[in-house]
Amino acid sequence: MKILAWNCRGAAKPSFLSSFRRFVQLHCPDICFLCETRISGEGLRRVQRRLAFDWDSFVVESQGLSGSILLLWKRGVASVDVFRNCTQQVVMVISEPNEAPWVLCGVYASTDYRTRRVLWDELTRLLTQGIPTMVVGDFNCILSSNEKRGGRAYSDSGDRREFREFLDETGLVDLGFSGPRFT
């Protein structure tokens, strides 16, 4: 099963649908996790309708112009049951034919470190249950100075240490990315 996770930084942009279709054609994903769509209401429903021919979907609407998660999966490939969602994550059970079910967690973490702590705690509880789980998305936190450009000088602040401890405790591994290093 192929999963595409994309921080699209705005699904209302004119280039979004053509870019999405190009990514799908190039990578042939079965599940697409899109975060930071920055749309809600009728704009989000319009995007869903344009994609409805091939995909089923689940949405966490944006809060104003920030955030939002759009989860898409190809019809007939797997059964997807969402059992937890909030502004920072969608947790779902994926059931493929002739395979054991597994959990996919799509994350769009808050930029507020205090709010991210709640996410780290929830994910830690989920991941330590021993269920096969994949976590994808945007954690909105960095581990080293080479992950940022501009702005204030990098410091190993408490929120970054908390993120590192979370990764160490859960055994999560950064699989890397493709595309521009900085947006």
Image: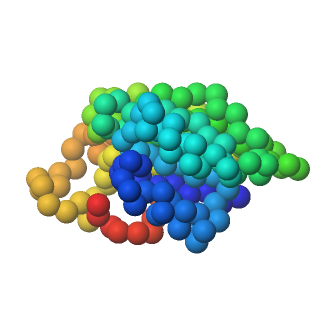
Instruction: Give above or below for 16 relative to 132.
Output: below
Across and down, in percent, residue 136 comes to 52, 50
- In the rendered image, residue 181, in percent from the top left (x then y), is placed at 33, 67
Q: Nearer the viewer, residue 11 or 171?
A: 11
- Residue lying at the far right of the rendered structure: 98
- Residue 155, percent from left and from top: 17, 51
Query: Which residue: 31% across, 31% down?
Result: 64
Does 130 sit left or right of 181 as displayed? right
Image quarter in which the C terminus is found = bottom left
For residue 102, what is the image quadrant?
top right
Hey, which residue is sitting farthest bottom in the picture? 26
Asked if residue 171 can be seen in this view, the reply is no
Q: How is the image coloured?
A: rainbow
- Tell me which residue sits at (55%, 42%) in the image: 48
Q: Which residue is painted at 32% across and 38% down in the image?
A: 66
Query: How many numbered tags mark residues here?
Result: 0
Q: Kindly tell me whether residue 39 is visible in this rendering.
A: yes
Residue under the point 27% across and 34% down: 112
Quarter holding residue 61 = top left
User: Residue 125: x percent and y percent?
Assistant: 55, 30
Up-down: is 162 above or below 2? above
| The N terminus, quarter of image | bottom right
Answer with left or right where residue 95 lies relative to residue 132.
Answer: right
Q: Nearer the viewer, residue 152 or 56?
A: 56
Relative to 43, say whether 143 is above or below: below
